[in-house]
Amino acid sequence: MGRAADTRRRINHFHTLIKECSKLAAAKQSLLSEPGARPEDAKGIDEKIERVSKEMAEMGGLDWYQKASLLGQSKKRGGDTSRWLVGKLRELGLSKLDGGRLRLLDVGALSSLNYAKEAAWISVTPIDLNSQEPGIYQQDFLDIDPSRTTRESEDALGGADSDEDAEEKTRDISHLFSMPFDVICLSLVVNFIGDPAKRGDMLKQATRLLKPSGLLYLVLPLSCVNNSRYLDDGRLKEIAEYLGFEQLYMHHTAKLAHYVYRFASGRPVPGTTNEGSAATKYKKTMLHSAPGRNNFSIVV
């Protein structure tokens, strides 16, 4: 097996471990929510979570995964999905707009230089859970609160009582998200999340952070839509439309599925998993029962 193939195999296995960990965490939460449940009742699940976490750590953890993914993004491997998006932005005439640069939020960014060539018309805010370079802000996309204002963030930086307090407060980057974005890029990040409902939360969060008529760029491994029991292009389009998106582009390559959506609705966004939404509109429903398919799904 070649080095590239071995890396892909390890990345796939890492994904499997993440999904297993998410399922175990959900099982623990369900068990402990039962009347009379005690923490020790979840001892068996905790032991399984510890084993899975240990295996992930032995593989190098999130740091290893991101570095492996960064290698896959190199030009030599043709993995930089930003190039396809830039072409579509130009096609839409967005490279020649008056009134300043496009604000683009790059979620799960592996490089702060992905849009460097377009700096004259794109202003990028790159974020990631575990930043691999100084130019990428360490931030959980789902934790961004669009109601926080620049003034609130600036106020938080003043009046520190100690050097330690001052250092902690200077980490507040909420001012970067106080204004809505023209474009949000979710390239190969939704599939990284093990919980189908949390994947749906990623799409909901995009509606909160986009301007009216803003664009969402979504990239998934092709197998998520052409070899899943629970998701295909048609179901993904239904989910997007339910959230207020209009699909502008869809493009499949040998390994990836690219989508560009325009946020076209002002309807209230369904609550996230943590907020406790009402009824689930799109559950994990069997669409294709042929053997050999995977279980990838998005729940909204």
Image (cartoon, rainbow, N blue to C red):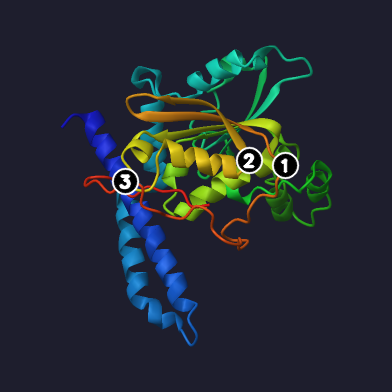
- Horizontal and vertical percent for residue 15? 35, 47
Marks 3 and 1 in Cβ contact (< 8 Å)? no
Callout 3: SS: loop
Q: In the drawing, what numbered circle is on residue 294?
A: none
Q: Circle 2 is placed at which residue position? A: 244
Residue at position x 34%, y 36% from top?
226
Q: Is residue 98 visible?
A: yes
Q: Position of residue 89 (x, y in %)?
A: 59, 19
Q: Secondary structure at mark 2?
A: loop
**Residue at 49% from the left image edge and 20% from the top image edge:** 84
Image height of 29 relative to 265, above or below: below
Dots 1, 2 in contact, CB < 8 A? yes
Residue type beneath disc 3: His
Give the quarter of the image for residue 118: top right
The residue where tag 3 is placed is 288
Residue 35 percent location from the top left of the image: 50, 85
Quarter-of-image position of residue 116: top right
Residue type at the position of mark 1: Gly
Marks 3/1: CA–CA distance = 33 Å
The front one of 245 and 169 is 245
**Residue closer to the observer: 66 or 255:** 255
CA distance for labels 3 and 2: 26 Å
Q: Which residue is mark 1?
A: 266
Within 10 Å of the Cα at label 1, are there few (<14), some (14-19), or many (20+) other Cα atoms?
Answer: few
Q: Residues within 10 Å of mark 2 (few under 14, many from 20)?
A: many
